[in-house]
Amino acid sequence: MSYTKNPGGPSKGPSSRGPASRNGRASDAAPRGKPQFDRSGKPQAERSGKPSYGGKPSYGDKPSYGDRSKAGGNAQSTGKLHPPRIPRPPRPAPEPINKLEGEGERIAKLLARAGVASRREVERLIEAGRVKVGEITVTTPATLLTTLKGVTVDGNPVKAPEAARLYAFHKPSGLITAERDPAGRPTIYTALRNALPEGTPRLMPIGRLDLNTEGLLLLTNDGELKRAMELPSSGIPRTYRARTFGDITQDRLEELMEGIEVDGIRYGRIDANMERRTGRNQWIELTLSEGKNREVRRVLEALGLQVSRLMRTKYGPFELLDLARGQAIQIPQVQVERFRKGLKFAKARGE
């Protein structure tokens, strides 16, 4: 079959085409499109009898963007293609934190509540430059923070405060109420290692008992609770039992209700009662709310009595009861929360 020629153009039939190639095009057909040039500006030679298409001509001797020699020197010096880099000024050293205004709580209070240490000990840590927020050193315990995030002590991150816990410990005589003693004497923590289960948080004693005083010693992981229970303004009563030797009457003991001054130190109201007497030996129960250093011993000695044994049996609503010497128990959380609410309520009323 043959096709007629198209009067308006070349014939589309097979008779007008040369030998067909694989793709159906004639190998000798005229190339369509623009010829491709090589970098010298000359037409690129055809390969395998096939012209190549789509090539882009070069721009002669026009320098490329990376050719500094033809651009007339350093391209950066022109300021067009590569603007010169301006070195950044060095960052100033972080200033110590001394934030005394704004929202939040004092960092000393937050760290004490987290159980890091008591407020006084926290103040010493801050004074020694051992407390930081990020890389910035805290310089005053009055610094206000809303959270302990990023706070470290000696490089160790401070954990979020746990719920306040309270423990009752029957302190034996002969133990120091401290973490360590320069003289090497045993401390309460020596006995607490065996008295408390593993996983118990770091505990701080509430108040102190002298070396030769035994009985109830409360411990907590909450520095804020510790401070509130120690302050004389809280008015928390402490009850002691003292075995004494000497002559004393109940009438003389009742005079302590008006307070007494010993060696220039004024001691407040003391409720003292004779329990029992054997000859010149007697047991006396005393309840006071200030808790000054060696207060019970000094007051009884001022009355002419010799104290041979002294033990604390009660601190606020918490009692020693039948807790064995050297043993410790955790006070139920319900009692602790009830006691804390009572403290806050009394503080709010100004009592």
Image: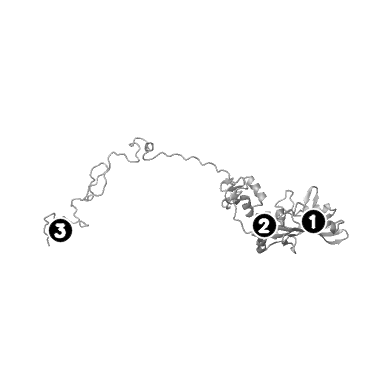
Relative placement, left or right, of 254 versus 19 is: right
Residue type marked 1: Met
Q: Where is residue 263 in the image (x, y as percent from the top left)?
A: 80, 48
**Which residue occupies the foreground of this view, 191 or 258?**
258
Instruction: Please tell me whether mark 2 sits on a helix, a strand or a loop.
Output: helix
Alpha carbons under labels 2 and 3: distance apart: 112 Å
Q: Work out how far the residue at label 1 is from the one at label 2, CA to CA, in angstroms.
A: 25 Å
How far across and how far down the image is residue 128, in percent? 64, 45
Q: How far apart are marks 3 and 1 (CA)?
A: 133 Å
Residue highlighted by disc 3? 14
**Colour theme:** one colour
Comparing labels 1 and 2, the label whose residue is closer to the camera: 2
In the displayed structure, does residue 193 sit left or right of residue 280?
A: left
Q: Which residue is tagged 1? A: 257
Residue 165 is drawn in which quadrant? bottom right
Residue at numbered disc 2? 349
Front in this rendered view, residue 125 or 316: 316
Q: Can residue 105 be seen in this view?
A: yes
